[in-house]
């Protein structure tokens, strides 16, 4: 079953899209664009079948216990994808990773920070809608460094 929560009225964050039913539910909820942060691209056909725009900014997760720092360029590419999707009127975007606990919430945190939110407010907003993500978001320091480095 599609697993996502609304961060704002136009931005959702969540986990993988596994079935055509998931893709149809996402489209029925008004989501028009998918931003996949996983290295796997297995849902492309599913989302395109229901007419959704598919974007990808893949990065590995912390699967082996070693936390790889995320570069500014990765955050910037996600920001550009989100802003491009939101530039179209009535568009809505789903930012997703495998479980919706690390990459997608960290990206949403970065987006909020780049939009001018404070560190605490951005973290609290993401943690409120994805409570399980609170202990899994591991790239907030990288996101903060990218916000500063990129001049957002």
Image (tube, rainbow, N blue to C red):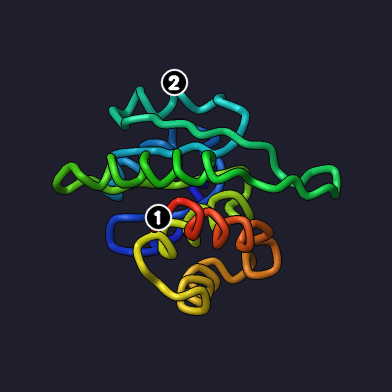
Residue under label 1: 12
Instruction: Tell which tag, 1 or 2, sits nearer the viewer.
Output: 1
Please tell me which residue is depicted at 50% across the width and 28% down the height of the picture: 43
Image location of residue 23, percent across then percent down: 41, 36
Please tell me which residue is depicted at 35% across the width and 23% down the height of the picture: 49
Q: Is residue 35 visible?
A: yes
Q: Quadrant of residue 141?
A: bottom right
| Residue occupying the far right of the picture | 65
Q: In the image shown, does 78 or 64 lie closer to the viewer?
A: 78
Q: Are marks 1 and 2 in contact (CB under 8 Å)?
A: no
Quadrant of the drawing holding the C terminus? bottom left
Q: Quadrant of residue 34?
A: top left
Residue under label 2: 45
Q: Secondary structure at mark 1?
A: strand
From the viewer's perspective, tell me whether residue 53 is left or right of residue 126. Answer: left
Please tell me which residue is depicted at 40% across the width and 60% down the height of the picture: 114
| Residue occupying the far left of the picture | 89
Judge the density around disc 2: few (<14), some (14-19), many (≥20) Cα neighbours within 10 Å: some
> What is the distance, in whole Å, between disc 1 and disc 2 at their CAs?
20 Å
Q: Secondary structure at mark 2?
A: helix
Residue 74 in the image: above or below residue 42: below
Please tell me which residue is depicted at 57% across the width and 33% down the height of the picture: 58
Image location of residue 83, percent across then percent down: 30, 46
Q: N-terminal of the two: label 1 or label 2?
A: 1
């Amino acid at each position: 079953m599609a697993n996502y929560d609304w961060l704002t009225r136009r931005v959702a964050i969540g986990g993988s899209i596994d079935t055509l039913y998931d893709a149809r539910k996402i489209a029925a909820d008004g989501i028009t664009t998918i931003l996949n942060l996983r290295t796997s691209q297995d849902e492309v056909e599913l989302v395109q079948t229901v007419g959704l725009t598919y974007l990808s900014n893949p990065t590995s997760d912390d699967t082996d216990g070693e936390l790889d720092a995320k570069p500014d360029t990765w955050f910037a590419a996600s920001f550009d994808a989100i802003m491009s999707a939101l530039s179209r009127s009535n568009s809505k975007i789903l930012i997703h990773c495998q479980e919706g606990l690390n990459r997608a919430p960290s990206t949403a945190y970065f987006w909020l920070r780049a939009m001018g939110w404070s560190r605490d407010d951005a973290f609290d907003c993401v943690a409120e809608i994805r409570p399980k993500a609170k202990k899994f978001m591991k790239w907030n320091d990288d996101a903060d460094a990218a916000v500063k480095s990129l001049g957002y």
